[in-house]
Amino acid sequence: PDRIISGIQPTGILHIGNYYGAVKNWINLQNSNEIICSIVDFHSITLSYASKLLDHKKLPENILLMTACLLGCGLNSEKSILFLQSEVPQHTQLCWVLSCLTTVPRLARQPQYREKSENIKDIPSGLFFYPVLQAADILIYKATKVPVGKDQLQHLQLASHLARKFNALYGETFPIPELIFSGNIASKIKNLRNPHKKMSKSYPDKLSRIEITDSPDDITEKIKKAVTDCTSQVTYEPDIRPGVSNLVGIHSVITGRSPAALCDEVKHLNTGQYKLLVAEILIETLKPIQKEINQLLNDKSFLISVLKNGAIKASKITSDTWTVVRKKIGCHYFL
Ligand code: TYM
């Protein structure tokens, strides 16, 4: 059977890009597979030293909020393993071993590193090692499948490279993890303020994303203010009309209908009217999830117990892999 693992940073509130690009896929997969889902708090501190955007005092609260959001979206803590990365030390231990198997130039070429370090004067080395820790998150479970959005492609390629490298040097140990995407549109939901970029938790302008907990008024305002162009017709042409196409894309991902069918159906509407329709659909879709999240947030001790049990289940797997790794690399006198 497949071993499926994924992760999410608790840097902000879950948005519809995360939901349709990744989380919804985890929930579909959990019916027939065990899903291991890590709230990657160690990843989320990589930029806190360099940017004022992240506040470490808010991290514990964000972690519980992310836990409630994931459960509220339908992740089942009985069937799946939901846990906090920092509670399972073998992730960072394997990260060290893997970091010894790659090179400084290779990590420096990672597109996300280049992009994120571009405007920082004192680049934290944690940002540089970010994808190695992500590879460790995956390989420590000997994962075979990793459901993520398109933005994670290069990180996954590095994880596969490191698995091959380890296997070649120390003998067959890790399966080569395979990526799974939710679908062409769902895997890359765009930023509402700048449709050339992806929707992201950390983008400074909150109007750029629909957060899963947004009120109906917030949703309407954000969709109304979504950047489109001066053509009033609704069409799906991502290359030349990325703004309106992103709205059609979101509409298509929610309803499961093709962009062409949707454009045909709304040909009597201009983009302004169409925005109100998309907002309405989003509001209705998120309503039941929000109800669940609000209920979960009333019971913080339950959320903590989910993470605690998850860490216990996760540790059973990681300590086995870690013992094998230590033996293979020769660091094992006391085992
Ligand atoms: P993160 O926290 O940025 O995002 C969580 C998941 O949501 C997907 N995603 C999107 N999908 C579609 N459209 C978007 N606009 C969009 N934005 C985000 C991401 O692809 C991801 O699947 N580095 C990872 C976290 C991580 C991880 C791992 C993932 C750490 N270790 C191990 C998988 C396996 C990240 O920052 O995700």
Image (tube, helix red, strand yellow):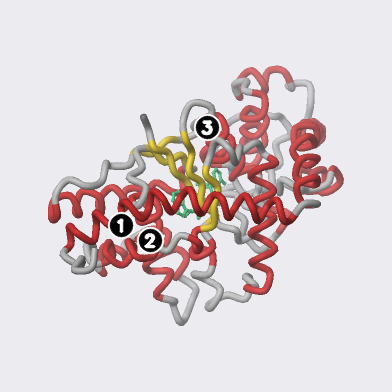
Disc number at residue 90? 2
Q: Locate residue 272, reporting x and y percent.
A: 80, 37
Q: Locate residue 109, reporting x and y percent.
A: 31, 62
Query: Is disc 1 surrounded by few (<14), some (14 to 19) or many (20+) residues within 10 Å?
Result: some
| Residue 241 appears in the figure | no
Q: Are marks 2 and 1 in contact (CB under 8 Å)?
A: yes
Q: Earlier in the sequence, mark 2 or mark 1?
A: 2
Depicted 258 relative to depicted 201: above or below: above
Query: Is disc 3 surrounded by few (<14), some (14 to 19) or many (20+) residues within 10 Å?
Result: some
Which amino acid type corresponds to the residue marked 1 in the rendered image? Trp
- Identify the residue under disc 3: 30
Which amino acid type corresponds to the residue marked 2 in the rendered image? Gln
- Identify the residue under disc 1: 322
Depicted 197 relative to depicted 59: above or below: above
Query: Distance of mark 2 from mark 3, alpha carbons?
Result: 24 Å
Which amino acid type corresponds to the residue marked 3 in the rendered image? Gln
Query: Distance of mark 2 from mark 1, alpha carbons?
Result: 7 Å
Q: Locate residue 3, reporting x and y percent.
A: 39, 37
Between circles 2 and 3, the one closer to the viewer is 2
Q: Earlier in the sequence, mark 2 or mark 3?
A: 3
Q: Which residue is situated farthest in the front direction here? A: 334
Q: Locate residue 23, reporting x and y percent.
A: 57, 40
What's the residue at 47%, 66% (across, down)? 116
The local secondary structure at tag 2 comes to helix
What's the residue at 38%, 58% (across, down)? 111
